[in-house]
Amino acid sequence: MSITIDSTVRKAPPSLPYEMLKDEVLGKRYSLYINFVGEKRGRNINQESRGKSYVPNVLSFPLTESSGEIYITPAVAKREAKDWDHTYPEHVQYLFIHGLLHLKGYDHGDKMEALESKLMKKCSIKRTNPQRG
């Protein structure tokens, strides 16, 4: 069906293959809303929906069997990226994939991690500063 990207943060989200990844994981008929939010809004959504008081990196919510939404907090993604040995765009892509897999019904564990790795490799982002050896 469709993919809608909305951002309430000043800097635009990285340009990534969002629709291709959505289609790969959830299918072409799935309608997805991606929301890039600031830390305050992310914390509020997490508190209201899950009773958790921290700022999340990603949240996913199924709306119907064929639609859902994902919230990504870019400030958190930026801070976490180096801990994961990711660039900022790579980490946003990872978080997006993580959210997609939750919408598909996966829980944290080996199977989800294997699928995340597979999808990250399939849609690898070229680094802008490759290390020279």
Image (spheres, grey):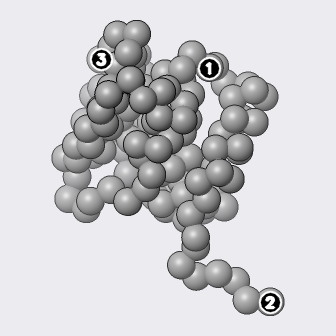
What amino acid type should be assigned to the residue bearing mark 3?
Glu
| Residue depicted at 54% across the width and 31% down the height | 25
Name which residue type carries label 2: Gly
Q: Is residue 103 left or right of residue 9?
A: right
Q: Relative to the observer, which residue lies in front, 57 or 104? A: 104
Q: Dot 3 lies on which element?
A: helix
Asked whether the beta carbons under mark 3 and mark 2 sit within 8 Å of each other, the answer is no
Q: Is residue 73 visible?
A: yes
- Mark 2 neighbour class, 10 Å CA radius: few under 14, some 14 to 19, many 20 or more: few
Vertically, is 17 above or below 87?
Answer: above
For discs 3 and 2, the disc positioned in front in the rendered view? 2
Q: What residue is shown with label 2?
A: 133
Q: Alpha-carbon neighbours of circle 3 within 10 Å: few (<14), some, or many (≥20)?
A: few
Q: Is residue 49 above or below residue 24?
A: above
Residue under numbered circle 3: 48
Q: Residue at x 49, y 62 (%)?
A: 88
Q: Position of residue 69 (x, y in %)?
A: 34, 27
Q: Position of residue 97 (x, y in %)?
A: 54, 39
Above or below, 99 against 106 in this view is below
**Residue at numbered disc 1:** 106
Tell me whether the residue at label 1 lies in contact with that at label 2, contact meaning CB atoms closer than 8 angstroms: no
Give the label on residue 2, or none: none
The residue drawn where x is 64% and y is 44% is 119
In-image side of 76 versus 42 (left or right): right
